[in-house]
């Protein structure tokens, strides 16, 4: 009798242990909501190793004759520079891409449509900027106003903007 009681007690404990560990919809829902809450980021910047680089890129506005012109300072370099070409002080940028192919395609279309100075710039991340004019800061502010009035391609906010280069030229 004592053996049967011990066997029954062990069987009951094993059954209770197995059935109590089942997952249910409430458990999945709670885990999902906790994971989503941990992902929410209000900064607008992806959680990648490039956060620091993106935060270093200073974005602001400059006012010229009553117009607010977007202005960005960032360390960039030329993609496939021709011999003797150097980095300018500032550029008018009309688009940004994550893939070099897309930036190069747009730059080629702009060259075909009369913007012979269209070039592609790259950041350390890399992000690829398509620029259609280069020169000093004051000239690029004026050109940015002209280009904004007669955009060569459909652009998204905040483009066109003036990109001031940081570092070696």
Image (cartoon, rainbow, N blue to C red):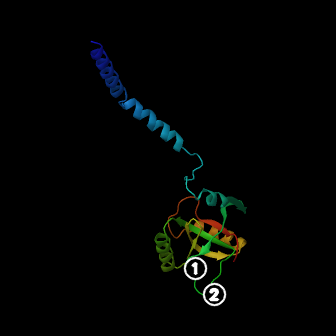
Q: Dot 2 lies on which element? A: loop
The x, y position of residue 115, in whole percent, is 55, 78
| Vertical order, 100 against 29 (above or below) | below
Q: Dot 1 lies on which element? A: loop
Q: Nearer the viewer, residue 131 or 64?
A: 131
Q: Which quarter shows the C terminus?
A: bottom right
| Vertical order, 125 against 22 (above or below) | below
In the picture as drawn, the residue positioned furthest to the bottom comes out as 83
The x, y position of residue 76, in whole percent, is 63, 71
Residue 55 appears left or right of 3: right
Q: Which mark is residue 117?
A: 1
User: Quarter of the image holding residue 151?
Assistant: bottom right
The x, y position of residue 86, in whole percent, is 65, 81
* Chain-order first, disc 1 or disc 2: 2
Q: Nearer the viewer, residue 93 or 49?
A: 49
- Spatial CA distance of label 1 from label 2 is 15 Å
Residue drawn at (53%, 60%) of the image: 156
Q: Which mark is residue 84?
A: 2
Q: How many marks?
A: 2
| Vertical order, 87 against 16 (above or below) | below
Q: Nearer the viewer, residue 13 or 92?
A: 13
User: Quarter of the image holding residue 1?
Assistant: top left
Q: Given this view, does label 1 or label 2 mark the residue nearer the observer? A: 2
User: Quarter of the image holding residue 84?
Assistant: bottom right
């Amino acid at each position: 009798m004592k053996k049967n009681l011990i066997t029954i007690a062990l069987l009951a404990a094993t059954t209770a242990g197995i059935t109590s560990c089942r997952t249910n919809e409430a458990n999945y829902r709670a885990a999902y909501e906790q994971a989503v809450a941990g992902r929410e980021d209000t900064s607008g910047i992806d959680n990648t190793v490039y956060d620091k680089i993106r935060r270093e890129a200073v974005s602001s506005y400059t006012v010229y004759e009553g117009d607010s012109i977007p202005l960005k300072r960032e360390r960039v370099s030329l993609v496939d520079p021709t011999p003797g070409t150097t980095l300018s002080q500032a550029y008018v940028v009309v688009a940004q891409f994550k893939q070099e192919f897309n930036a190069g395609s747009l730059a080629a279309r702009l060259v075909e449509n009369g913007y012979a100075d269209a070039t592609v710039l790259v950041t350390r991340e890399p992000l690829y900027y398509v620029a259609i004019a280069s020169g000093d800061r004051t000239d690029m502010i004026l050109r940015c106003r002209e280009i904004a009035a007669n955009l060569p391609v459909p652009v998204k906010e905040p483009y066109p903007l003036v990109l001031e280069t940081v570092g070696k030229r």
